Image (cartoon, rainbow, N blue to C red):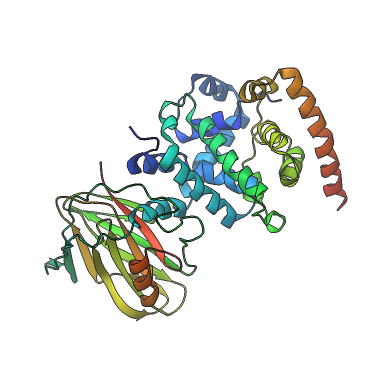
């Protein structure tokens, strides 16, 4: 068995999960063309190195981490033009447990955060994960995550306030 | 942070993954049920994946094997008003996975050209089905290429198989804006292999065939059904 998925596996994966991965790319990158680039990179990665997907206990969770990595990598490389791109359609399908203004502030500020903050911000304000879930995912204590979320929230509150003022 | 399952759990549920905990939550939570229902509806209405077609096309984009004898036979057979082309597809030799160093780069090099959309109309027995991104074929299938244009322009379309063979299904012509079906159909033989439909301006298609760089043309992937 190779490290990657076969063409039929990739096609089936895209049929079942593709919409959700593309939506996530659009939410994180807020640029349709860039999201398309990200999606292409993700599918290529899966084709070459995605064999672990077959054993993933939570397929969508596994795929979202691959997606986040690709999107954050693109943001870090500066290939973005997020300011001009509305995300109304993505907002319409925001997670029910996350306050819309905090979600928007997190997405607005995403490119300004460091990699660790980006992960915590996405898991907290996009995915609606509990602090314990985030701690388990990132390998930190819940107390550490609590402190990071509090610091992030303070920063994002300022972003949200600026947004309201502008 | 939230009394609701995380988005990956809700989205996984919407995608068809079964999670008893999510199912139990949904039974009592109208907000999450609505989120999942809207997700399912949005997924159903979403356009086809251009990225998948490009990734699959890139696999077909391996350099042509010059030593291989490619046989494409054109056999005329009645199919409504259209001529039928029989594409003799053979089992390919093992092809190494495309790499960025040995084949055209995928990211950024393979693009869908705005204003020209293609789809495959697959005929299987008495059934007809339309595909806008990827189409699975099996022996006996026939398909034609549907080209939609936003303005008048010269267009050609054909099928590039992973063994390097090429079959023109839409001869170069100046087409008006609107939707056009290729005048020829391709028939799949007993041993289908991967391929890609390429459509665009004749010069661009010719260049894409020769270089396996799909910049400036529109592509759609074909693969054998499991």
B65 sits to left or right of B86: right
Q: Do we see residue B196 in this rendering?
A: yes
Q: Position of residue A133 (x, y in %)?
A: 64, 22
Residue at point 57% right, 57% down? A33
Q: Residue furthest right?
A: A165
Relative to the observer, which residue lies in front, A165 or A109? A109
Question: Which image quarter is the N terminus of chain A in?
Answer: top left
A57 sits to left or right of B75: right
Relative to the observer, which residue lies in front, B207 or B6? B207
Residue at point 73% right, 35% down? A117
In this rendering, the answer to whether B226 lies above or below B18 is below
In this rendering, the answer to whether A143 lies above or below B141 is above
A152 sits to left or right of A81: right
Residue at point 80% right, 33% down? A153
Residue at point 71% right, 25% down? B1
Query: In which quadrant of the rendered view does residue B180 lie?
Result: bottom left
Give the total number of marks visible in the rendering. Answer: 0
Q: Position of residue B115 (x, y in %)?
A: 48, 70
Q: Position of residue B39 (x, y in %)?
A: 54, 40
B29 sits to left or right of B41: right
Q: Do we see residue A92 in this rendering?
A: no
Q: Position of residue A15 (x, y in %)?
A: 41, 43
């Amino acid at each position: 068995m190779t490290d990657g998925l076969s063409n039929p596996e990739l096609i089936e994966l895209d049929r079942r999960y593709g919409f959700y991965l593309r939506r996530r790319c659009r939410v994180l990158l807020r640029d349709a063309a860039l999201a398309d680039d990200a999606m292409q990179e993700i599918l290529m990665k899966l084709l070459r190195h995605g064999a672990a997907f077959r054993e993933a206990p939570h397929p969508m969770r596994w795929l979202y981490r691959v997606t986040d990595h690709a999107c954050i990598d693109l943001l870090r490389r500066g290939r973005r033009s997020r300011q001009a791109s509305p995300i109304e359609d993505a907002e319409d399908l925001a997670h029910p447990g996350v306050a819309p203004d905090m979600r928007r502030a997190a997405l607005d500020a995403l490119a300004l955060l460091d990699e660790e903050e980006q992960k915590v911000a996405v898991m907290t304000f996009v995915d609606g994960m509990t602090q314990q879930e985030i701690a388990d995912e990132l390998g930190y204590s819940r107390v550490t995550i609590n402190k990071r979320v509090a610091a992030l929230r303070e920063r994002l509150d300022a972003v949200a306030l600026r947004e309201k003022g502008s | 942070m939230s009394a609701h399952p995380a988005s990956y759990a809700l989205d996984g549920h919407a995608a068809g993954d079964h999670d008893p905990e999510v199912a139990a939550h949904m039974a009592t939570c109208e907000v999450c049920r609505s989120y999942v229902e809207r997700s399912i509806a949005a997924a159903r209405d979403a356009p086809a994946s251009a990225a998948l077609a490009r990734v699959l096309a890139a696999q077909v984009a391996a350099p042509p094997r010059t030593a291989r004898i490619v046989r494409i036979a054109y056999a005329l057979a009645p199919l409504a008003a259209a001529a039928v082309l029989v594409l003799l597809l053979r089992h390919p030799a093992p092809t190494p996975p495309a790499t960025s160093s040995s084949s055209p780069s995928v990211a950024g090099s393979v693009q869908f050209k705005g204003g020209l959309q293609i789809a495959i109309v697959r005929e299987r027995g008495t059934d007809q089905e339309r595909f806008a991104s990827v189409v699975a074929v099996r022996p006996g299938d026939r398909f034609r290429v549907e080209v939609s244009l936003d303005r008048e322009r010269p267009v050609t379309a054909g099928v590039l198989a992973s063994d390097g063979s090429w079959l023109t299904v839409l001869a170069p012509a100046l087409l008006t804006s609107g939707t056009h079906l290729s005048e020829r159909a391709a028939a799949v033989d007993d041993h289908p292999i991967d391929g890609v439909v390429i459509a665009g301006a004749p010069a661009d298609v010719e260049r894409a065939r020769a270089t396996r760089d799909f910049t400036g043309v529109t592509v759609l992937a074909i693969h054998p059904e499991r």
